[in-house]
Image: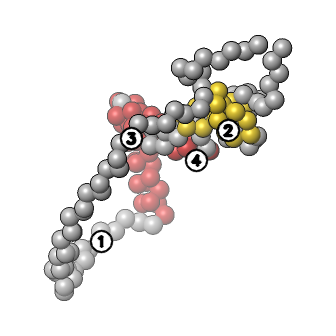
Amino acid sequence: MLVARFPIFRQRVCHWAPCGAVFYLCRRCDRGQRYCSPRCREKARRLQRRQANRRHQQSPEGRDDHRDRQRDYRQRRKACCGVTDQSSLRPSAGGNLPASPPEEPRKAIPAPDLLPAEPRPTTRWVVCQICGCRGRWINPFSEVKRDFL
């Protein structure tokens, strides 16, 4: 009978596209998380809401909602503060700014010698992103065959 001494981890890739970090979760903490951190989750949620608001504002109902909000806002401003026409500002005396110096061309970084990679072990130590416990991640796609007794 095979007894695991260390927890087995699941590998995830952060769904926030600019991040794309690989992170690991132990079975106990794995609840189907899609993001590596609360910050990535908040950014993704903010983007989802922004896209939903944009779709709504482009629909006929959204345009009507915007029209009604603007009408109410203008009435509130008129009631409390009055509406006055502001005169335009005078042009400033110094109209021209000096041009910025041209950027120097960047030097190409030489590529390292491409040597054949050493074979990586099929197991390695990882840390759970949630609870911080340490264990091993076993690559299920490894070409090395393992015999379990």
Q: Quadrant of the N terminus?
A: top right
Q: Which class describes the residues within 10 Å of circle 2: few (<14), some (14-19), or many (20+)? A: few
Read off the residue under disc 4. 39
Residue under label 1: 86
> Residue at position x 60%, y 38% from top?
23
Res 64 visible? no
What residue is pinned by disc 2? 125
Q: Nearer the viewer, residue 73 or 137?
A: 137
Mark closer to the chain start, 3 or 1: 1
The image shows residue 84 at horizontal and vertical percentages of 34, 68
The residue at the point 41 percent across, 33 percent down is 56
Amino acid type, mark 4: Arg
Q: Is residue 102 left or right of residue 62?
A: left
Residue underneath mark 3: 115
- Distance, label 1 to label 2, CA atoms, is 67 Å
Q: Could you tell me the amino acid type at mark 1?
A: Gln
Instruction: Give the CA distance from mark 3 to mark 1.
Output: 70 Å
